[in-house]
Image (tube, rainbow, N blue to C red):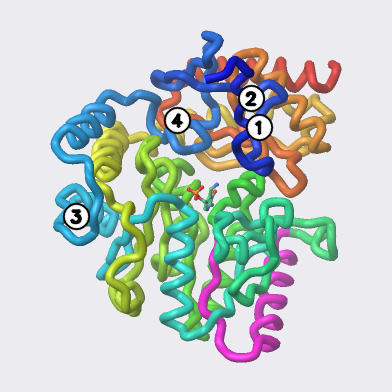
Amino acid sequence: MNDRALHARHRAVLPDWLALYYANPIELTHGEGRHVWDADGNRYLDFFGGILTTMTAHALPEVTKAVSEQAGRILHTSTLYLDRPMIELAERIAQLSGIPDARVFFTSSGTEANDTALLLATTYRRSNQVLAMRNSYHGRSFSTVGITGNRSWSPTTLSPLQTLYVHGGVRTKGPFAELSDAEFTAACVADLKDMLTQTGGSVAALIAEPIQGVGGFTSPPDGLYAAFREVLAAEGILWITDEVQTGWGRTGEHFWGWQAHGQQGPPDILTFAKGIGNGASIGGVVARAEVMNCLDANSISTFGGSPVTMAAGLANLTYLLEHDLQGNARRVGGLLLERLRAIAAPLETVTEVRGRGLMIGVELATPAAATAVLEETRARGLLIGKGGLTGNALRIAPPLSLTVGEAEEGAAILEAALRAAAGA
Ligand code: PMP
């Protein structure tokens, strides 16, 4: 051991590109409910759900007990033996997915889940051409950087895929800026059709986030994805919904994000990760048997579906369904959205407050303003996230058990931070 500050040691031994929040980064030591503590003993209200991985609550006793009991029995991972917790969780997710004759494959992260979805779609369709949305984020592995539309999150352009990026996820400054929602949707559909006539050979799939997460919690206008779906289904092109941030009831009105888009029927492939493990590393893919079974592989990776993470997922899923946390996200998220809109109304620095359920984006005029608010909230005991097209949006995604009192407390802190950062 040496006595250099932990931050300096991090810098000296980990990659330079491993980004940290805050000028003086935080080391979290423990959590409880919707709160976390750092190594200096500071307590924070967590409005970022441990970056959306702590979906339900910090240190949820049901999850802790399930993990420790399973780890005490056997701590191993193998896809070569029967794994009871994996089968049980797969049965529940298959049923919840709404996908007919569903098969579930577990991974350890969202990136691997999307990687597997790409492997399935390109194999099934015998094509490495895929469509992704502009401003999307699906991971940074070698294949998923190829479907991640924002350059600042995509460290290489040497993708093994041929990707075309589609308009619709976010209204950029280009020719679409001044259009109404209906005109924008029509223009995006026309552009998609045009794109399909220009591609040589078949396209495997389109992958889309129901609400762009890292992109700043932006949604396409209602009906846009449904219109896309119709065009793509006519050509047999698969629809992959990336539910890594939007699944499990976070958006309040629906259990899955895709359900808000008026699409006819479930997607061909659904990917999930983050919150289902309440902090344990779970990702996964759901697809109907015909698509899932097109691969000739005896597994993809060793660790997906480990009994310990599966036990966490089962306990967490049971808790969130039994306590109707989707309903809580709708109720408390609705109140929070209303409150934040009222707070933002007189502030010139805030250009938009948007969201569904407990997934709320606050867009600021500049990236510098977002960074300043991030620091101000931290100083006042609130953790939030950042994202958006240029890093100019604040992301609010608390654990789904957030209470009304905590929502009000967080909103008050955010108001003070916004005012301080604006010099008001
Ligand atoms: N898809 C989406 C929509 C995400 O937000 C993320 C992570 N931010 C990923 C995929 C990648 O998931 P992971 O970090 O678990 O690999």
Q: Based on the picture, tell me whether residue 184 belongs to the magenta stretch.
A: yes
The three-letter code of the residue at mark 2 reads His
Taking the spot 43% from the left edge, 80% from the top edge, the residue there is: 123
Q: Quarter of the image holding residue 129?
A: bottom right
Q: Could you give the CA–CA distance between mark 1 and mark 2, rounded to whole angstroms?
A: 6 Å
Report which residue position mark 3 lands on.
87
Tell whether 265 sits left or right of 70.
right
Dot 4, crowdedness within 10 Å: few (<14), some or many (≥20)?
A: many
What mark, if any, has residue 399 been given in the picture? 4
Up/down of 307 relative to 325, above or below: below
Residue closest to the eye, 95 or 158: 158
Asked whether the residues under the numbered discs 1 and 2 touch, taking CB atoms below 8 Å apart as contact, a structural biologist would say: yes
Residue type at mark 1: give it: Arg
* Kind of residue at badge 3: Ile
> In this rendering, which labeled residue sits more in front, label 1 or label 3?
1
Label of residue 11 in the image: 1
The x, y position of residue 407, in whole percent, is 53, 22
Residue found at x 52% / y 8%: 41
Question: What is the secondary structure assignment of the residue under circle 2?
Answer: helix
Chief secondary structure of the magenta portion: helix
Residues at marks 1 and 3 touching, judged by CB atoms closer than 8 Å: no
Determine which quarter of the picture holds residue 417.
Answer: top right
Q: Which residues are magenta?
A: 181-208
On the image, the x and y values in percent for residue 173 come to 83, 56
Q: Observer-nearest residue: 335 or 383?
A: 383
Name the element at disc 4. loop
Can you identify the residue that label 2 sits on?
Answer: 7
Q: Which residue is painted at 25% across and 50% down in the image?
A: 77
